Image: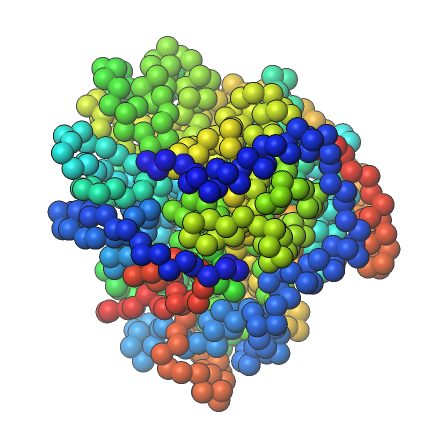
Amino acid sequence: MSTEKKTTKTRTVRIYFMGKAYDVPQGLTIMKALEYIGYRFIRGIGCRGGFCGACAVAYRLAGEYKLRTGLACQTTVEDGMYITLLPYSPMEKPRYNLEEMRGEAGYILKIFPEIARCVSCNSCTKACPQELEVMDAIQAILRNDIKRAADLIFDCISCGLCSLRCPAEIRHVYVFQLVRRLAGKYLLPKAKHLEERIKEIESGKFDAEIEKLMKASIDELKKLYMERDIEKA
Amino acid sequence: MSEGYPLELRKAIRVVEETREERLKKKYRRLTLEERDELVKKWHPDYRPDTKRELKVGPSRGAIVYNEVADLLEAWPIADPSKIDLSTIDYDVDILIIGGGGAAASAALWSLYSGIEPDNILIATKLRFGDANTVKAQGGIQAADRPVDSPVRHYLDTIGGGHFANKPELVRALVMDAPFIIKWLEDLGMMFDKTGEGEMIEYSGGGASRRRLHCARDYTGLEIMRVIRDEVLNKGINILEFSPAIELLTDPETGAVSGAVLWNLETSEYIIVRSKVTILATGGFGRLHLAGFPTTNHYGATADGIVLAYRVGANLRDLDSAQYHPTGVAYPEAILGELITEKCRSLGAQLVNVNGEQFIYELEPRDVVASAIIRECAEGRGVLTPTGVCGVWLDLPMIDMIRGPGTIKKNLPAMYRQFKRHGIDITEEPVLTYPTLHYQNGGIEINVYAQVLTPQGTPIPGLLAAGEVTGGVHGKNRLMGNSLLDILVFGRRAGMTAARIVKETSSKPKISFKHLEKYTAELEKINVPKTRKAPIILPDYRGNPDYRGKNPYLKILEITY
């Protein structure tokens, strides 16, 4: 970057990583704080931007009994924070053939019967770092409203924190994966314009024009490029 | 749980608010090609004389590449042939796929569809399967499937955006396969944004002349990855996680690539894989922090693939150009360099300097917009954060004003969430941005079958590549929405080619480190220090959580076996 860092002294906060105390600069995420301490991550790290769900953490704040959850790459350290990493939520991925299914709850319950054990305690929702309505989604499946369930948990990043907290031992990560795919395949209408275009391509409609562009000189291409009309955003 | 913008930035935001009403009526004019050229040459890091150098070894000797890339290509192998026993093969498969993202998953599925048994396919990943830039791609995937659009337009947009340096036959493959790829994803159950009638809701991206971006909210890449990953798992394809490749293996008689040495990150064991075909789908180089820039890339993006391919004779192209995404996070510090999707600008958000003025049409190609932002900051029209990072405003609240309240929360939930965690409400406040290292435009040269080519243009037997690790598809600059397309189009082509080669190959190849003899002799000649090794596998941020300034990250992950 173009400018020098100011020389103001950084304030530090004290964190307890798996019980051990460290003083780290204020304002860092938990992930950067642990790197500052000297950890070189292999597990519990992925995209570093809140999309991959690899870096789930559990923590308590000083003086509080409440167990909080979050993502190490998105949560800023606070003074008196007790932290542990939860890089994996143990569960087997069931195998299925989507072609043999429909967008109905019965297919989901057959693979994941534990959904019916949901006691609506809402622990899953409270644990979700994405602030999704996890319990509502499970209940929507039970009401056979697959589309609504899929919409509610579309932003799921599969961190597994809900599954670790769930007293009914639901494997949310894989349940929701199936829910989304069933909704996408069977409950959203197909794009007709897409099929039309594929037919056109297969019939060779654009071949000659593309061939012409491939053979054009750079100057010709530049001219065509600048003269092309641009659709309103 | 931060309290949002500090006072000095709040003051600066007032200027943005005061000029918003007036700006809503105005579009900044598009630049001519000459003006674009002048802007980019003056301000883009690709044109800074201190960022690059000539390669001194290997098949593309003489090519100009970024210093950090040259450091890894002019480096000793991690694998010491005298210490690795090749007599015991741990995995003997038809197809080895190296990489954990969309290109790898696409290649695996299309090998399978082309008749290879799942047991004969092995995917080796560095971190988890799915830990890749794919899941971070928010904006969308391009495909010319509306009646007002055509693959011909898509071709012209892509070539123009790439400064006419793209490889034409690869671009044709990209644009002609595109609608088919979208259909494949739809059939697999991807939840695209659609109208009630099923019509795709499509947005414009920088440098595109039609609305052509297919989205799944602002989690498009994540949705693609989780769908195709789920399908790979359903099919029972073998996956070896936390096992990056550290060297390819070659048949000493034919020179064909015949497998790889993997390294189990958790037990520090070497894993020997023999394969008839190897597909490199290792992604790009963001974590090398070229020119000292922060990056949007995932933790494992350390250019391993180009290092491995180069040692077996691959030609490298366009590695003198890198894509800096115009809008990386400049504040808050905790998420410095993370991506602010271009979709914000597609939806109408303008770029504004410290004086509340627009200074560029926001949907110019990425290198043009990035250059304009760098210029504003260099010439004193940027905004300084308390820690001295410079940026310009991206006026997000405009989106809801143009497209109606609720648009941001509905279309940009990932962004809304990310800033809310730091006390910033993007429906009310603009965000501060500065370019961030985003994409490896160039890489290993391939043909339309995804075969890796030598500088003479002949395929290296047994080696294919797909996705960001390759070069030629995007020329010197990639358009938004063309990378998600690239990984699936060329992943598919790699999978199909691999299956064809497997069917034509009856005997098992031999494995050796023969290719290293010539390469290490060259390294010896130019006196590369023995401590410089590659691939580095992961960046090293220990003790230094700040990405700016000098580059201390190129330190290999130590092997203690």
Q: Residue drawn 81% across and 49% down?
A: A225
Q: Nearer the viewer, residue B432 or B95?
A: B432
Q: Is residue A170 left or right of residue B76?
A: left
Residue A72 can be seen in this image: no
Q: Residue drawn 79% across and 41% down?
A: A206
The correct choice, above or below, for B315 with respect to B401 in the image is below
Q: Is residue B558 left or right of residue A50?
A: left
The colour scheme used to paint the residues is: rainbow
Tell me which corner region of the image, top left, top right, bottom left or bottom right, holds residue B443.
bottom right
The correct choice, above or below, for A107 with respect to B367 in the image is above
- Name the spot of residue A106 as percent of width and height, x first: 37, 15
Q: How many marks?
A: 0
Which part of the image, by quadrant, shows the C terminus of chain B?
bottom left
Tell me which corner region of the image, top left, top right, bottom left or bottom right, holds residue B1.
top left
- Name the spot of residue A167 as percent of width and height, x first: 19, 23
Instruction: Return the residue found at the far top.
Output: A143
Q: Residue drawn 28% across and 68% down?
A: B559
The correct choice, above or below, for B26 with respect to B108 in the image is above
- Name the spot of residue A7 as percent of width and height, x first: 37, 60
Q: Is residue B129 left or right of residue A65?
A: right
Q: Residue drawn 62% across and 43% down?
A: B355
- Name the spot of residue B398 as percent of width and height, x first: 60, 30
Q: Nearer the viewer, residue B38 or B464?
A: B38
Residue B518 can be seen in this image: yes
The correct choice, above or below, for A86 with respect to B183 in the image is below
